[in-house]
Amino acid sequence: MSYSIVADSCCDLTDALRAAPSFRSVPLTIHVGGRDFVDDETLNTASLLLAMEESKSASSSSCPSPADYLDAYRASEGDIYVVTLSALLSGSHNSAWQAMRLFQEEQPERNIHVFNSCSASAGEVLLAHRLTKLAESGLPYDEVVKKADHCIAEMNTLFALENLDNLKKNGRLTKVQALLTGALRIKLVMGSTPEGEICKHGQALSVKQALTKIVDIMVQDGPHSGKVLCICHCHCLERAEFLKSLALKCCDFSDIIITQTRGLSSYYANTGGIVAAY
């Protein structure tokens, strides 16, 4: 069965998935110091991070428009599965859903489903990876949707960041959390709620300790036989490999994927950030 997967650019796809003809990426845009950085294949994340560091003014991001998604749907073949950021974190999901309604009017015979990942970054990659396996297995469209929804319901996303400046600026941390991390240089272990909001799981005195706490949480959530762990890193492959080595010792994941953050994930994670989903 022919299929396509459309994802917003917070889905930090591996090089192999990004190169696959079945994938379409719809970019968000990051606004820093009067410059617009479109989160597509031409974006240099190092340049984005440098601009963020140098800028004294507030920065922001904007989601794709329904027209952007509609163009991606029109360019897709077969059944269409759409992966977006958590609806509670971005308007990307709403744009994708509005575009779906327009597309259904144009081509009512086509199957299309928009998934709210209730996550971001590694969580979106994990969902896209799962959808690929399900679609290529030959399952009917309805079964693929059902099993992917189950994947979202079971998924857990955790992250540890070196720098929380952009989460603070954009109101993603409470005032108390912002004060604690700034004054005491504490590293927070964060994650997502089942609904897709950001929550705190713990804290540590270093990123290495925070990564160890992440694996402790994974162990508590086990067993993981048959599951995949996805680790996204923002220019810190060594930390991603460290987390992978801990997970290999303590958990029984069937596979572990490592990939680098693209523009939007880099914007929030900053250099040194790690996002994991399983």
Image (cartoon, helix red, strand yellow):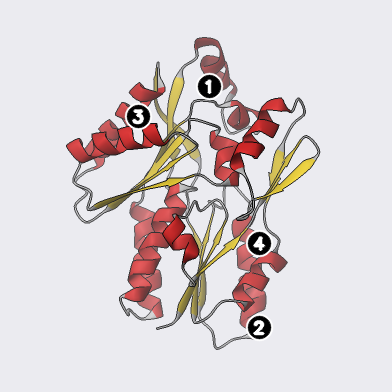
Please state the total of marks drawn on the protein image. 4
- How many neighbours does mark 2 have within 10 angstroms: few (below 14), some (14-19), or many (20 or more)? few
> Considering only vertical position in the picture, is 87 above or below 150?
above
- Residue 170 percent across, percent down from the top left: 65, 34
- Please state if 222 lies on the left or on the right of 243 as rendered: left
> Considering only vertical position in the picture, is 167 above or below 144?
above
- Sooner in the amino-acid sequence: mark 1 or mark 2: 2
- How many neighbours does mark 3 have within 10 angstroms: few (below 14), some (14-19), or many (20 or more)? many
Secondary structure beneath disc 4?
Answer: helix
Is 210 in front, or is 141? Answer: 210
Q: Which mark is residue 95?
A: 4
Q: Residue at x 36, y 62 (%)?
A: 130
Q: Which residue is mark 2?
A: 105
Q: Residue at x 67, y 76 (%)?
A: 102
Which amino acid, by three-letter code, is at mark 2?
Answer: Glu
Q: Which residue is mark 3?
A: 211
Q: Residue at x 58, y 34 (%)?
A: 172
Q: Which mark is residue 177?
A: 1
Label 4 to label 2: alpha-carbon separation: 16 Å
Secondary structure beneath disc 2?
Answer: helix
